Amino acid sequence: QVQLVESGGGLVQPGGSLRLSCAGSGRIFSADTLGWYRQAPGKSRDLIATITSRSSTNYADSVKGRFTISRDNAKNTVYLQMNSLKPEDTAVYYCNVIILGAPVYSWGQGTQVTVSS
């Protein structure tokens, strides 16, 4: 059974940084496109960053230039470095494998990011 476990969230002041991790088990992800999503209270879950098996990346306009997605295939892990955080980045962050533009597996528990002074 494939599991995705997100970690690294927390409370941070505006302008601060966090690094999220998502560790996968039950499947080797090295050939997959991986993505980070986020869901703010009362809003839909949105895709914000993707990384292909060749480490080509893509970002939503809302995070472009501030967030960086990366992967470590040896650890079966994908990361999200978040800099210059804003209150509107407050959300629960999730990762998933993406095939044909859609998330594949059941969602993990996510990791809460709260940006507030």
Image (cartoon, helix red, strand yellow):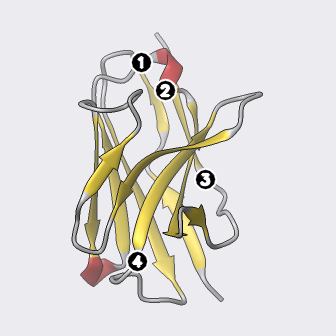
Pointers 1 and 2 in contact (C-beta within 8 Å): yes
Mark 3 to mark 1 CA distance (whole Å)? 19 Å
Q: Cα distance, mark 4 to mark 1?
A: 30 Å
From this view, report whether residue 67 is shown above or below residue 36: above
Q: Is residue 115 visible?
A: no
Name the amino acid, label 4.
Answer: Asp
Residue shown at 55%/27% (left/top)? Answer: 90
Disc 4 secondary structure class: loop
Horizontal arrangement in the rendering, residue 52 relative to residue 11 (left or right): left
Q: Amino acid at mark 1?
A: Lys
Residue 31 image point, x, y percent: 35, 83
Dot label at residue 86: 1
Residue 19 at what x, y percent from top left? 33, 46
Q: Is residue 55 above or below residue 7?
A: below
Disc 4: which residue: 32
Q: Which residue was labeled with disc 3?
A: 110
Q: Residues within 10 Å of mark 4 (few under 14, many from 20)?
A: some
Task: Residue under label 2, please give it.
Answer: 89
The quarter of the picture where residue 91 lies is top right
Label 3 to label 2, Cα distance in Å? 14 Å
Q: Residue at x 54, y 48 (%)?
A: 37
Label whose residue precedes the other's in the sequence (3 or 2): 2
The amino acid type of the residue labelled 2 equals Asp
Q: Nearer the viewer, mark 3 or mark 2?
A: 2
